Amino acid sequence: MTTRRTILLLEDDPNLGFVLKEHLELHGFAVDLHTNGVEGLEAVAKRRFDLCLVDVMMPKKDGFAVLEELRQARPALPVIMLTAKG
């Protein structure tokens, strides 16, 4: 039995977050979705993730602030930044 890879998804748009979560789960990933940076960092403190997908523009703590704290807490954790900005 193989262990499913776990992804932390930080996306404040509920529709996009739902679509991304469903798509990733259909491809075998376990996805923990949070809608702001504060909740996301709390999740990282409690759980192990294989990858973080982080929206740049989020309430409470934006993606860049989350990335900075992630680098201090878990420097080897892969992070992909998501943005709709040009």
Image: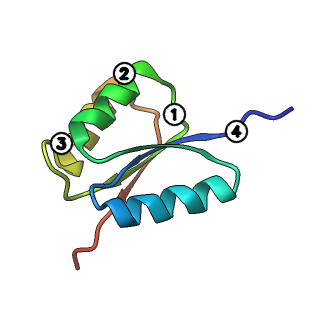
Amino acid type, callout 4: Arg
Q: Which residue is labeled 4 in the image?
A: 4
60 left or right of 75 in image: left
Which residue type does callout 1 highlight? Phe
- Alpha carbon of mark 4 to alpha carbon of mark 2: how far? 20 Å
Which of these two is toward me, 69 or 35? Answer: 35
Find residue 16 and report its horizontal and vertical position in percent: 39, 66
From this view, report whether residue 10 is shown above or below residue 32: below
Placement of 36 over or under 74, stated as above or below? below
User: Do tag 4 and tag 2 residues touch (Cβ < 8 Å)?
Assistant: no
Q: Residue at x 69, y 57 (%)?
A: 27
Distance Cα–Cα, label 4 vs label 3: 28 Å
Q: Give the mark toward the camera: 4 or 3.
A: 4
Q: Amino acid at mark 2?
A: Ala
Q: Earlier in the sequence, mark 1 or mark 4?
A: 4
Q: Earlier in the sequence, mark 1 or mark 3?
A: 1
Q: Nearer the viewer, mark 2 or mark 3?
A: 2
The quarter of the displayed image where residue 26 is located:
bottom right
Residue 17 in percent (x, y) is at: 40, 59
Q: Position of 62 compared to 76: left or right?
A: left
Disc 1 is placed on an element classified as loop
Q: In this figure, which residue is indicated by the disc labeled 1?
A: 49
Marks 1 and 3, how far apart in space? 18 Å
Residue 33's place in the image compared with 76, above or below, is below
Q: Residue furthest bottom?
A: 86
User: What residue is shown at x 64% (from left), y 47% (from top)?
Assistant: 29
Q: Please say if the residues under marks 2 and 3 sit with CB atoms less than 8 Å apart.
A: no
Residue 34 drawn at (x, y percent): 35, 43
